[in-house]
Amino acid sequence: MNYPVLAIALSGFMQLLSSVEYWTALPSGYIGIYRRNIDKLVLYSKDGQKWQLDDISRVDNVSFFARLFRPLSKIRAQVELRHEGSYDVDELRGAFRAAVEADDDILAQYYSHEQMYALNHTGFRGGHLV
């Protein structure tokens, strides 16, 4: 997979992963977010390829109390991804728009939905994520 990658779940989750090192310093609380979105989360790489998240697990052993009281402590995660082929800009825009529309204001805490829709038309060049 060629980074950066835009991870999108149509349920309203979106995350930009700048490099493969993202998985080596993942906030421990994010494991649950990714697990809830397995089979719904698609990762769009900058080279026009898309990947499906099949599984995610902790490499580091973290106690229950550490996960409960320190959900942002960094851990290493093991991910299993399945290559789903290529995507075109219309598919990426559609996924982006669906995530923004399903957003519960987490995505739109700094920018309005209208500003994010405008980005949907300017953040892609040559059919791929910039």
Image (cartoon, grey):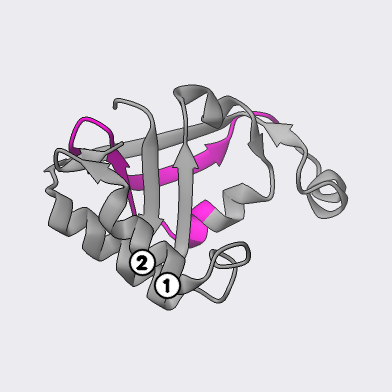
Q: Is residue 115 above or below residue 44?
A: below
Q: Is residue 113 left or right of residue 92?
A: right
Mark seen at residue 22: none
The answer to whether 68 appears left or right of 60 in the picture is: right
Point out the stretch of residues depicted in magenta.
34-61
* Residue drawn 58% across the image and 25% down it: 24
* Nearer to the camera, 55 or 48: 48
Residue identified by numbered label 1: 114
Instruction: Specify the quadrant that holds the C terminus.
Output: top left
The label number, if any, that marks residue 117 in the structure image: 2
Between residue 26 and residue 61, name the one nearer to us.
26
Q: Is residue 94 left or right of residue 103?
A: left
Q: Amino acid at mark 1?
A: Glu
Where, by quadrant of the figure, is residue 106 drawn? bottom right
Which residue type carries mark 2? Tyr
Give percent across and percent down for residue 10. 35, 67
- Residue at (68%, 29%) from the top-left corner? 60
The image quadrant of residue 99 is: bottom left
> Residue 91, position in %: x, y?
17, 57
Q: Residues within 10 Å of mark 2 (few under 14, many from 20)?
A: some
Q: Secondary structure at mark 2?
A: helix
Asked whether residue 10 appears in the rendered view, the answer is no
Q: On screen, 10 above or below 19?
A: below
Crowding at dot 1, Cα within 10 Å, few <14 / some 14-19 / many 20+, comes out as few
In the rendered view of the protein, which quadrant contains the N terminus?
A: top left
Q: Say which element carries label 1.
A: helix
Residue 34 percent coordinates (x, y): 50, 52
